[in-house]
Amino acid sequence: MMDIIRTKDVVYEYIRRDDEGAVTGITTAVDHVSLGIKQGDFIAILGHNGSGKSTLAKHFNAILTPEEGTVWVDGMDTLEEKNVWNVRQTAGMVFQNPDNQIIAPVVEEDVGFGPENMGVPTEEIWKRVEESLKAVGMYEFRKHSPNNLSGGQKQRVSIAGVLAMKPKCIVLDEPTAMLDPQGRREVLKAVHELNKLEGVTVILITHYMEEVTDADKVFVMDSGKVVMQGTPKQIFTLVDELKELRLDVPQPTLLAWELKKRGIPLPDGILTGEELVQAIKDLK
Amino acid sequence: MLRDITLGQYYQTESVIHRLDPRVKLLGTILFFISLFCFSNPAGYAIALLFLAAVIITTHVPFSYMIKGMKTIVVLIIITVVINLFMTQGDVVVEFWKFKITKQGIVMAVQIFFRIAMLIVGSSIMTLTTTPNHLTDGMERGLRFLKVIKVPVHEIAMMMSIALRFIPILLEETDKIMKAQLARGADLESGNIFKRIKAMVPILVPLFISSFRRANDLASAMEARCYRGGEGRTKMKPLKYTSRDAVAYLVLFAYMVVSISVGRLDALKIM
Ligand SMILES: Nc1ncnc2c1ncn2[C@@H]1O[C@H](COP(=O)(O)OP(=O)(O)O)[C@@H](O)[C@H]1O
Ligand SMILES: [Mg+2]
């Protein structure tokens, strides 16, 4: 199957200048990244702050375009001017701060914002708004003001806003970073359902490792480079390396790893509490 | 602290006026204003007052609520009325110390009072019965003809509606920053006006920085959702005229004809 997103040797640099315009520093935020993402997958991108996740994510829907290398979204080169709007329609994006991405003063109008921009006819917009709000469980809030919603609810409205554009792929840039545990659960549940029920490719960017245990594939970034990729099991076997990358390994994985270091023969890549309990029971 | 500020004092009732197309209300308000400046006799003001009263009753908004928001403007009205009362030259009626009140002055003051009061009540009817986003929609559609002379009507309307969405968020943020600075011992309430203005700087600077960050984020989010200006955009809630709007236009037309033709009759002039 064709990759929904493919990048080849992508490089992006932020150049800092002083008041006179002289260059005072260069940050290579994305450094020769090549990756492929399969249609319908649930992908996670991990990395500590400043590792270049957001910068890479913005390449997936042509908010940024690569300085070197190429990004293809559903086969379209993001550098070509004529592709920009199709790319943005194909790969929707949800950002970290829920307050800064809701545009309209009423929930349903905000969800309609994307389709309005795409020139979708009025009746079709209403249909899409209804479907999208129902998909994230926010339909009964359609007449509310976003200001009175909780963080998790606002983020689900943002997701509905992207869904209403009927994208093949949704990129979520740390959508849970500003939420409480309850809000995080709500958002993650909505995202997983989209992937399973609607078949939308999900790219979840996060630095919470426990959010990625269900992913089909995990990419780990550090200083702009993709330094690891594989299934969650493969990645979580490499506890030493993850610690070196300043990532917090999920508690059960860490506990299993510590036990193993002390000579208890547990299997590699334990991700959840249940798995750990099962593995310990199996020891006897 | 700052949360008490209410914006756009929309008051929900199920009246006909509420359900009118915002374009009707916009044009109606403008025409009403124009009519107020056409009168040369008291009869004109009387008709305007009756018309206004009829509209107020139709809105079902309590009159006390309507004038509640006007307290701050009362000072302005009083000053204007007093200036007109004492400064107009003409036939002296009362005289004390250095002040003279003339007949023309009294007439002028009464006229100005009714004009300003009706201007304010008239425009507040529009904001009381129209939600802010309906209002910007109405402006965008109603002023579309200005695009011919390169006025960016869509952009202005979009800016207004984004401002309306973000003002409560920024107020909340200001509140937070103020509390944070107070917790660090900032003194915002004492001292003369210059001291207080200076004390505002540590609040405004972080507020500006965060506003720019928000603006930047919002621009990215809008672009990511394919926003590219008003061109080729469809509307989820397009404005549509109904028969009730036609009736409203007729009533408005009748008011204009009657009030201005009666209001300019020389026979009814008192001076
Ligand atoms: N607008 C910007 N201007 C300059 N440098 C930036 C900008 N945005 C990000 N950077 C730098 O690029 C690097 C990667 O940032 P980012 O992609 O935001 O990482 P992450 O999302 O993983 O935290 C960081 O070192 C950051 O300081
Ligand atoms: Mg980031």
Image (tube, rainbow, N blue to C red):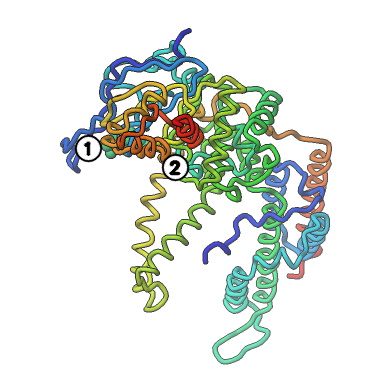
Query: Which residue of the protein is positioned furthest toward the front in this rendering?
Result: A284
Distance of mark 1 from mark 2, alpha carbons?
A: 27 Å
Q: How many marks?
A: 2
> Which chain contains the residue that carries disc 1?
A
Q: Are marks 1 and 2 in contact (CB under 8 Å)?
A: no
Residue B257 seen in the figure: yes
Q: Give the mark nearest the N terminus, 1 or 2.
A: 1
Question: Mark 2: few, some, or many residues within 10 Å (few <14, many ≥20)?
Answer: some
Please provide percent x and percent y for residue B73: 60, 68
**Which residue does the image show at 66% across and 45% down from the upper left?**
A144
Q: Which mark is residue A177?
A: 2
> Which chain contains the residue that carries disc 2?
A
Q: Quadrant of residue B139?
A: top right
**Which residue does the image show at 73% across and 70% down from the upper left?**
B271
Q: Is residue B255 above or below residue A236?
A: below
Residue B266 seen in the figure: no
Q: Quadrant of residue B55?
A: bottom right
Q: Nearer the viewer, residue B109 or A108?
A: A108
- Circle 2 sits in a helix, a strand or a loop, which is it? loop
Q: Is residue B4 above or below residue B8?
A: below
Q: Is mark 1 within 8 Å of ligand 1?
A: yes
Q: Which mark is residue A269?
A: none
- Discs 1/2, front: 2
**Which residue does the image show at 72% across and 48% down from the upper left?**
B28
Q: Quadrant of residue A207?
A: top left
Judge from the rendering whether residue A91 lies leftward or rightward of residue A46; answer left or right: right
In the picture of the structure, the residue carrying the numbered disc 1 is A16
The amino acid type found where label 2 is placed reads Ala
Judge from the rendering whether residue B216 lies leftward or rightward of residue B78; answer left or right: left
Please provide percent x and percent y for residue B224: 47, 29
Question: Mark 1: few, some, or many residues within 10 Å (few <14, many ≥20)?
Answer: few
